[in-house]
Amino acid sequence: DAGVIQSPRHEVTEMGQEVTLRCKPISGHNSLFWYRQTMMRGLELLIYFNNNVPIDDSGMPEDRFSAKMPNASFSTLKIQPSEPRDSAVYFCASTRTGSYGYTFGSGTRLTVV
Amino acid sequence: AQSVTQPDIHITVSEGASLELRCNYSYGATPYLFWYVQSPGQGLQLLLKYFSGDTLVQGIKGFEAEFKRSQSSFNLRKPSVHWSDAAEYFCAVADGNQGGKLIFGQGTELSVKP
């Protein structure tokens, strides 16, 4: 099992550009979570999906952020337009619903200049 | 709403010494509790979890944690720390009715002195 796969590992972009982060969950896991990690705010849950359906997006900071899960094996987190304050490490995690045994990806380090 | 507090931002221990990392939670019912570890540049790895039953749970890498309802605590312990244990440790709580949503504490960074 390759684990949760995130791409890219690092992204540097200019303010105002669109950024798309990608996640492939573990096969058979039907819950997927997007977290953001910063020094100031720690780990924040942005959104999570059960069976490809968004369940709770209350953590999405503003309309510039959007997330999709078109199928069980792929999810994207998009920021448009990006701002310097979006700089953070973005983690994707997956699990079987009700299991709580999250498996985290290695994260995408986003820098917006 | 659930919350998790890790009172210690940074702890330094000597290699071979014992370790205890503190975690306090706020939750009305019996919580599901977790400890994760994050090495630099890596994602989080599950060390152990508590759902019910025996209040002392064993995890990977020689870690254990004890659930104390009266103190709303779930402290992580290790009898003898190794240099490779240097990392950041996160306590988390889940609400069984929230479909697996985890709320994390702010983390405790552990440094190990030779």
Image (tube, coloured by chain):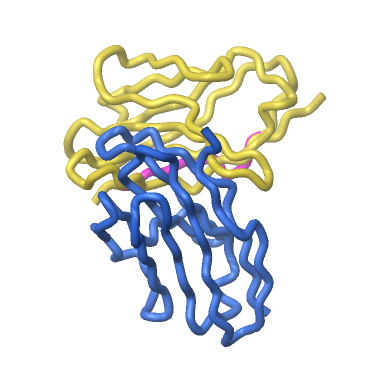
Q: Position of residue A2 (x, y in %)?
A: 55, 37
**Location of the C terminus of chain A (image quadrant):** bottom right
Q: Position of residue B63 (x, y in %)?
A: 53, 19
Please, which residue is most extreme toward the bottom here? A16
Q: Is residue B31 left or right of residue A45?
A: left
Q: Is residue A57 left or right of residue B13?
A: left
In this view, A22 is above or below A18: above
Q: Which chain is blue?
A: A
Query: Chain B rendered in what hue?
Result: yellow
The residue that appears at 33% across and 35% down in the rendered structure is A100
Q: Position of residue B46 (x, y in %)?
A: 48, 31
Query: Magenta residues?
Result: B3-11
Q: Is B114 contained in the magenta span?
A: no
Q: Quadrant of residue A14?
A: bottom right
Closest to the observer, A1 or B91: A1
Q: Position of residue A51 (x, y in %)?
A: 26, 50
The residue that appears at 39% across and 61% down in the rendered structure is A46
Please, which residue is most extreme toward the right here? B114
In this view, A35 is above or below B61: below
Residue A39 visible to an observer of this rendering: no
Closest to the observer, A99 or A6: A6
Q: Is residue B4 left or right of residue B36?
A: left
